Amino acid sequence: MPAPQPKPWIDAIAPYVPGRSTTDDGRKVAKLSSNESPLGTSPKAREAFAQGAASLDRYPDASAAALREAIAAANGLDPARVIYGTGSDEVLHLAAGAFAGVGDEILFVRYGFSVYPIAARRVGAVPVEAPDSDYGTDVDTLLAHVTEKTRVVFVANPNNPTGTYIPRDELQRLHAGLPGDCLLVIDQAYAEYLDEADDDGGMELAKTQPNVLVTRTFSKIYGLAAERIGWGYGPAPVIEALHKIRAPFNVTTAGQLAAIAALGDTAFVAAARAHNDRWRDWLAGEIASLGNAGLRAVASKANFLLVLFEGKLTAEEAYKALMEHGFIVRWLPGQGLPHALRISIGTEEETRGLAAALREIVGAAA
Ligand SMILES: *Cc1c(COP(=O)(O)O)cnc(C)c1O
């Protein structure tokens, strides 16, 4: 009997690997592997979420009108040009699906977000990786890899898993160097962690240019990862194309209510940003103070640090030893980073505990 055969480009997908939450022996430990919010969720968002239970029997608002209005009001945008998704992951897939297909190329930087190659292959497009520049995005190298087949360029700013960031003038230069028929997707999953002065100008490009889409998420600073809500902003014709292929009821009722309340709790967001600034810088300082053990944290503007292991102690050894100490971080051999760990910024207690454990592990290896 013949069996159904997946398309060859689907077969070629290396599945997404989520951050772990338990150890090999099943112990529950501090999870610093998925860049989640260490401060939890705004109490106002939890309350709003609970109100969603009153209408569990009804489909959600397919047009997410109130959510789009709230997003637009908070960011000075036109609500008609807001797209929403089951996580911003869905919006990234929509962009690939609407603008690329078999034979086309989708371009991104090496050590970029691991969803990009999946989004490309899923629609039969060829994922093209441009080399990084010391773990950062290099605009000239990206532009040098644009061909007449390039339909979509993904840039995460700040980038995951490196935490690196390209400033406004570099992002503008990237946009200016792209052909008009190439969609530039600026993935701003960590934008809310940036200082105002570090605004990369992506939203301004999405407001004014015909080929720029910005994506955002409620999963990170807003602490709503469980509800899967992301959104995007771009020119009307681009947004219209994305709507055609999104699932009709892709954002839940409770999720829409929670996201609206989360947007309104600006004090919670400010506290989350301040916490992140403080403990990210503190942890980077701790790693630098380990001296000549060969550990180096890449400069980060996100809610995590990519730590390179360039000495005797390997990232794999440190990963396993940290797990023994009760900390799960992300080891990334599948992303070409067998020599690196990505460590999310946790609570004060978790961050202090992790630094102490790392100091002990480095000492034992010396
Ligand atoms: C976490 C993350 C996302 C989005 O996640 P969703 O939960 O699907 O909204 C998108 N891009 C990057 C770079 C991320 O790190």
Image (cartoon, helix red, strand yellow):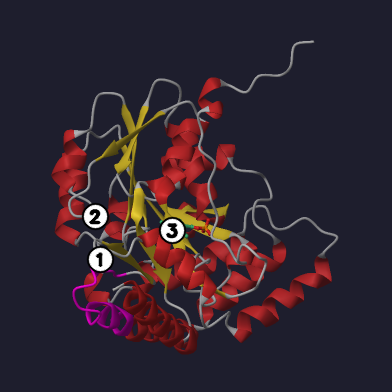
Label 2 crowd bin: few (<14), some (14–19), many (20+), radius 10 Å: some
| Disc 1 + disc 2, Cβ < 8 Å | yes
Residue that mark 2 sits on: 135
Q: Earlier in the sequence, mark 1 or mark 3?
A: 1
Q: Amino acid at mark 2?
A: Tyr
Q: Amino acid at mark 1?
A: Val
Image point 71% across, 19% down: which residue? Answer: 4
Image point 38% across, 81% down: which residue? Answer: 360
Q: Is residue 86 visible?
A: yes
User: The N terminus lies in which quarter of the figure?
Assistant: top right
Looking at the picture, does residue 128 appear above or below residue 54? above
Task: List x then y, in percent, for residue 90.
Answer: 54, 48
Mark 2 residue element: loop
Residue that mark 1 sits on: 298
Examine the structure image and report whether residue 223 is included in the region drawn in magenta. Answer: no
- Compare residues 143 and 209 and report the one nearer the observer: 143
The magenta segment is: 281-301
Task: List x then y, in percent, for residue 88.
Answer: 50, 54
Examine the structure image and report whether residue 289 is included in the region drawn in magenta. Answer: yes
- Compare residues 159 and 352 and report the one nearer the observer: 352
Label 1 crowd bin: few (<14), some (14–19), many (20+), radius 10 Å: some
Task: List x then y, in percent, for residue 278.
Answer: 33, 86
User: The C terminus lies in which quarter of the figure?
Assistant: bottom left
Looking at the picture, does residue 270 appear above or below residue 232? below
Task: List x then y, in percent, for residue 316.
Answer: 41, 59
Q: Earlier in the sequence, mark 1 or mark 2?
A: 2
Residue that mark 3 sits on: 331
